[in-house]
Amino acid sequence: MDFRSLRYFMVVAEELNITRAAGLLKMSQPPLSNRIKQLEQDLGTTLFIRKRNGLILTPTGEILYKRARQMMELSERTREEIIGFEKELSGNLILGTVEGRAPFLLARWISGFRDEFPLVTYNVRHGGSDDILEQLYHHLIDIAIIASPYNHELLEGFSVGTQPWVAIMPCEHPLAKKEGRQISLSELKGEPLILPERTSRLESIEQWFSEQGMVPNMICRLSSYINAVALVEQGVGICIFPQTTYSPNPYVVTKLITDTPKYAEYVLVYLKDHPLSELAQSFVDYVKDFQEEKRIHTTRFMTKEEEFAMPENATLL
């Protein structure tokens, strides 16, 4: 199995037609068919089911396609790093981020980093913490921002910010109309709740409710803040989520959860057993300086919206 065979396989897997794939590869059909058969023999498995009107990937074919894409991407990134090693700091930095406050932190870092290294380009991928970590473990992401907790044995990391947990509710809900910008956890008893999908996070929320002698009435799990707001807008339920950067929305009301207050922690992480590239290390160093010098509080990076003050007795969730 070599890179050329994998490239041929990927084109066939995307087209699911040998004739079309051969045309895209600018080669005749028989040699391409022979390459695929040889690859199947080398791996000892069938990669395609041959039909009269085309091809279908087998389960092992789907696995190979996923891994082949990862290998090709890693090969290209390695080539770029080697070519740019002796030049001014440049290259493409692939960053992963969860929802909530994290994308806004990342945007501030990229903005400042670009001032110092204008030749650098970026790919930003987002998803749930588990999805982002899976890509990090397979070297498809250089650095990631996730929510605590994380595996300290596999990852290096440091805290980059905290946000209180809030309740996002439809503006017509009785709790939304109550005076004040706070709500106790006990007031959410029995309410239909929209909760984060991450298993560790869900377990923590269940423990939070258990401390009050309650069980959360969960009706939906998700990882996206945008989806959360959309569901709340339509009156589906109340969402418990870390406070994110405020976007004006007349259909939802956000209140700080107290009794007992909790906060989420965002951490910047990268692999322990895989040395960072010069570019990735420079970005990590910049973020550390950003945190230590408190550039986040300068005029340029000052958050324009009003935020909830973190209660002194808030604990990590």
Image (cartoon, grey):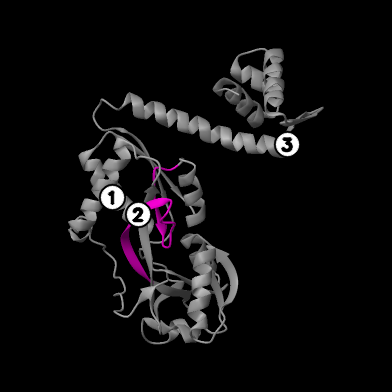
Q: Earlier in the sequence, mark 2 or mark 1?
A: 1
Position of the N terminus, as image quadrant, is top right
Q: Which mark is residue 109?
A: 1
Kindly identify the residue that appears in the image at 73 percent across and 31 percent down: 45
Residue stretch in magenta: 141-164
User: Residue 90 location in percent, x, y?
Assistant: 29, 32
Q: Is residue 290 magenta?
A: no
Q: Position of residue 128 (x, y in %)?
A: 49, 56
Label 2: how many Cα within 10 Å (few below 14, some 14–19, many 20+): many
Please tell me in which quadrant of the rendered image residue 178 appears: bottom left
Where does the C terminus fall, quadrant-wise? bottom left
1 vs 148, left or right, is right
- Is 254 drawn above or below residue 266 in the view shown? below
The answer, for residue 172, to whether it is visible in the render is: no
Dividing the picture into quadrants, the one containing residue 152 is bottom left
Mark 3: amino acid: Thr
How packed mark 3 is, by other alpha carbons closer than 10 Å (few <14, some 14-19, many 20 or more), is: some
Q: Which residue is mark 3?
A: 58
